[in-house]
Amino acid sequence: MTRSAWLPILLAVAGTAYAVITYQRVSRQATGRDRALLIGLRILAMTLVLFCLMRPALILKAAVPQQNFLGILVDDSRSMQIPDEGDKPRADFIKKNFSAPDSPMLAALNKRFAVRQFKFASNAERVANSAGLTFDGTSSRLGDALDRARDELSGLPLSGLLVVSDGADTADTAFEESISALKAQGVPVFTIGVGQEHLAHDVQVSRVDTPRRVLKGTALVVDVVVMQTGYAGQKVPLNVESDGRILAQQDIVLPQNGESSTFRVQFLAPEAGLKTFRFRIPQQKDEQVTQNNQRDSRLEVYDRKEKILYYEGEPRFEAKFIRQALEGDENVQVVLLQRTNEKKYLRLGVDNADELFGGFPTTREELFAYRSIILGSVPASAFTSDQLKMIAEFVNVRGGGLLMLGGRKAFSEGGWAGTPVGEVLPVVLTPGLEQAAEFFTEMSIKPTREGLAHPATQISDTEQASSDRWAKLPQLSTVNRISKVKPGATILLTGTDEGRTERPVLSYQRYGRGKALALATQDAWLWRMHATMAVDDTTHRTFWRRLLRWLVDDVPDRVELSVSQDNVEAGQPITFVSDVRDKEYAPVNDAAVMAHVTTPSGKVEDVPLEWSVSKAGEYKAVFTPAENGQYHVRVGAARANVDLGSGTANVVAGPSVSEYFDAGMRAPLLRRLAEETGGRFYTAKDTASLAEAISYSGRGVTVVDERDLWDMPIVFLLFLGVIGTEWAFRRAKGLA
Amino acid sequence: MRTRIVLAALLISVMSVGALAQRGGGGRGFGGSGGGGRNGQGNVQYDPGNQHAKYDGRWAFVRLRYQTGFGGRGGPQWAHDWPDGEHHFMQILDGVTNLDARLDATQIMTLDDPELFKYPIAYMAEPGYWTVNDKEAESFRAYLTKGGFAIFDDFHMQDWPYFEQAMLKVLPNAKFIDLTVDHPIYHTFFEVESFDVVKQYYDQGRPIFRAIFEDNDPKKRMLCMINYNTDISEFWEWSPSGFKPISESNEAYQIGVNWIIYGMTR
C-alpha cells in the first residue's frame, strides 16, 4: 500500500474513533439507536471534510474540436420511406438533420468534428451531405458500409462512426467480422435508430416454405407464416396466385399482435415450367407497410413420368384399383409386377418386353432406376438376402420412397421383422407372426393433426373440407397387427378397430436419403367400390394420386444441382452445389462437372465445379450474376467420357423486397453494434447528448479535461445538511 | 408347361372329390355355401336364397341372383351349376395361382345387394332368363362403373335378345363388342391361343365371346365378359364325371382362371 493511501485511512480511523468516543460520553438519556445515528452523522460530516481535503478531480479525454473526424453513415434504402416516425417517413429525420450544413444535428457535429458522410444501401459511397439521397436502395448492407467507412477513414484521427438507420440489415451474412475490425481499431460506433420498433398497423407474410421443384399436377400443401400488429383476430383472405390467376384462396384469422402463426394452403401446380407463386394478403385499412403483404416463391414444375415399381405378391384388388386411380396421370407411372403363382409374374405398365422379365430386380442399377417401390402382400421370403438389402439401400442410399401395403403376407405376418427392410419401415414389427392365427379387424379411419394438412392425406382443398371428407369414408380392414410406430415416425392416419383400439394406419419416417411409408390396410379400394361411395366420388383417386406423388416427391436424381440462393441481386455471388452419383448411387469424386449458365440475355457461360473434398460426391463453384433476369443453370457430370447425368436449377437476379420485411426499427441490432464497439445507441427522439458523447469517446486527438470534484456546490450543501441534521437531532433530544 | 401339368393333376384330384360326392348321393358343395341339396345330377332342387359369408378382405366367388321362374332343370336359372361349378373352379384357382381367395364359402347376392360392392368380380348364369328392375339396374350400373367386373355365362343362342334387353337397362349406351383371341383376358395367366380349344358342351355352333368396355373403348377396362352360346361353367361342374375329355375341361378352367386374374388387375 502506498504512503498516500495510508494517510486518508489513518485520518478516517481517527475521525471514527473521535466520533465514537464523543458520543459514548453523551448523556445517558440517549438511547443506543440515537447514539448510533449521531455517530453516523458525525462520521459522514468528517468524511466529507476529508473528501475535500483530498482534492479529487475527474480527468476526461475530450476530442480537440475540428481535429478529429467523424464518419456518418446514413441509410439510403427503401425501408426509410416507411411512415412510422410520427406519421412521417423515416427519411424525414435524415433530411431534417443531415441534408445541409445548417441542419441541426449536422451543425452540432460540424462544430466539433470534421464530418465525412456516407450513404449506404446495397453499396456504401461518400456524399457531401444527405440532400441528394433518394431512399430507394433495395437492400441494406450495414456490415459492408462499416467496412467501407473504416477503410476510407483509416489513418485519420477518428472519434467514431455514427450510423443513422432503421437497422434493417438485409445482408445474408452476419457482420461480426465488421464489428471485430472496429473493436480492434478502437473505433466506437454510435447509432441512431430511426422508426418505431413495432409498427402500429402491419400485416406481413413472413415466410413461405415451398419445395424447389415439384412434379406437374401435384397438389402442394405449403406452410405460410403470417405476422401482424393492429389487426388481431381479424379474418382476412390469403391468396395463392400465379400468372395473374388465383389458384387458391383461404380465409385466415390473424394472430395476436407481434405473434406469428403458420397457415397451410393447398393448390395445384398445373403447368410445367419455372413458375412464380405469390402468397398475398390484401392491403388492410391504415396499414403502414403494404409491400410485405406478399411473398413470391419460385419453383420448377417439371413434367416427366416418375416410375413406381409395385410388387404385389398375390392377385388382389388393391393392385387393380391403384392402377385405376393412376389411369390418365401423365406424371406417375405404376409398373405392376404381380406374382400370380410361385414362378409366374404378370407385368403391367412396363415400357418394354424386357422390363422386369426376370421378376423383381436383382441388381441395384435395375432397381435404382425406379423412383419409388410399393410392396404389396408379399413375404420377405420371396426375396434373396441381397434383394432385401437392396430395397433398404433404395431408401437409404438412393433416396427413393418405399411404401408397404397391408396384407396377409405383409409386415410382421409376412416375416419382415428383423430384415433390412423391417429396419427401414416406420412401424414396429413383431417377429414370429408368420404362422400365427389369422387376424382381422375393420377400422374407422381418420387423419391425425399432422395428416389433416399433409400433402399425402389432405384430400380436399382445405383442412376442414378434408376432415369432413375423411369422416364420411367407409371402414377399411387390416390383417396386420400394427400397434406402434418407431420413434421419429409420423402418423398421418389412425384407425379405431372393432375393439375400440387406436391403431396407426398410415405412417412414415425419413430414413437416410429417402422415406418409408406403411399403410396397414388391405382394401383401400373400398373407398372406390363401397356401396356408400357415389359413382362420381373421386376420393380414392385423389388419395392414391396424392400419396404416390408424395412418395416420389423430392427423390434425387443421380446428378443434383442446388444453388445457395435462388433470388439475388445482380453482383451478389452465389454458390452452385452439385451432388454426383453413379448408377448405383455411390458418390463419385473424380467426375468432370460443368455448369452451363444461360444468362437473361441468352449468353451461355461455362462454370466448372470442383470437388469440395469435405463431402463425397459434392462439387462446388461460385458464380456472380451480372444482369437482372432469370438464369438457367444446367450442370452435367461425366467420368471417363461416360455421361453420369445432369441437373438443373434456376436463379433470378433482381431488386429485392426484403427491406420491407420485419420492417420495424431493429433496436437490438443497433444497440449491440454500439455497445460492442464502445459507442452508444440513441433513438431519433433522444439525441441531445449525442455530440458531447462522441467528443468524450476518448478516440482521435484528445486533450485532458480536468474537472475538480471537491469544489462542486453539491459537496458544500451536503456538508451543511449533515451538520444541520446532527444539530437539530441533538436539540430535539435535549442533548445540545 | 409346368402350370399345365399342375392343372391337369388338380383336375384329376377334383374329379376324384366330385366322384366321391356323387357316390354319397349329393352332398353339399363346401363349407358355408349351405343351402341347396343336389339330386346327384347337378340339378338344384330349390332356391338356396342369398348367402353371405362375413367379409374378411379376401375375394370369394359371387354368384348373382335374379328374379325368374324355375328353370328347366328343377331350380332357378341363376343357380345352374351351383354349387359344384364354383366349388371345383375355386379348387383349381387355388391350386394354380397364389390368389388368397376364400375356399370356405361362396356368395350368392342380388344385383342391388350393398355387400356385392365388396366383391368386384361376380358371375351370372343363364343371363337369358335375367330380368332386372330399376333398383337393381341402378345399383349394378354403379357396381360396374366403379370397377366391378361381371362374367355372364351359360346361355344359349336364342337367349341373346333377353340378355341384351336387361343389359341395356343397366348400361343404356353399352355396345357389345366381339372379342378376338389376342385380347389380354386370354393371356393374363394362361395363354389361350385359339377359340377353337373351347368346345360346346351341348349347343350347336361356335361359342361367341363378347365384352362391354368402359366408354365402349376396347382399349379400356372390360366391365362385362359375355360367354354367349356356350357354358364354360358346365365343364367346371361336370369335370369329375368324365363326361367330357379332360382337355376340354382343362381349357374351360384356364379360361376361368384368366377371367379372375384379369378382373383382379384391370
Image (spheres, coloured by chain):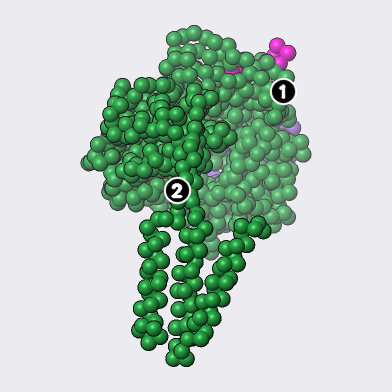
Chain colours: A green, B purple
Q: Nearer the viewer, mark 2 or mark 1?
A: 2
SS for callout 2: strand
Where residue B116 sits in the image (x, y, percent)? 46, 48
Which quadrant of the view contains residue A334? top right
Image quadrant for the C terminus of chain A? bottom left
- Residue at 30 percent of width and 26 percent of height: A101
**Residue carrying label 2:** A707
Label 2 – label 1 distance at C-alpha: 71 Å
Which of marks 1 and 2 precedes in the sequence?
1
- Closer to us: A510 or A44: A44
- Closer to us: A345 or B247: A345
Q: Residue furthest left?
A: A285
Q: Please, which chain is the residue tagged with disc 1 on? A: A
Where residue A607 sits in the image (x, y, percent)? 59, 14
- Residue at 60 percent of width and 49 percent of height: A488
Image quadrant for the N terminus of chain A? bottom right
| Residue A70 appearing in the image | yes
Q: Please, which chain is the residue tagged with disc 2 on? A: A
Label 2 crowd bin: few (<14), some (14–19), many (20+), radius 10 Å: few
Q: Residue furthest right?
A: A385
Amino acid type of the residue tagged 1 in the rendering: Asn
Q: Main secondary structure of the magenta part?
A: strand
Which numbered dot is residue A589?
Answer: 1
Label 1 crowd bin: few (<14), some (14–19), many (20+), radius 10 Å: some
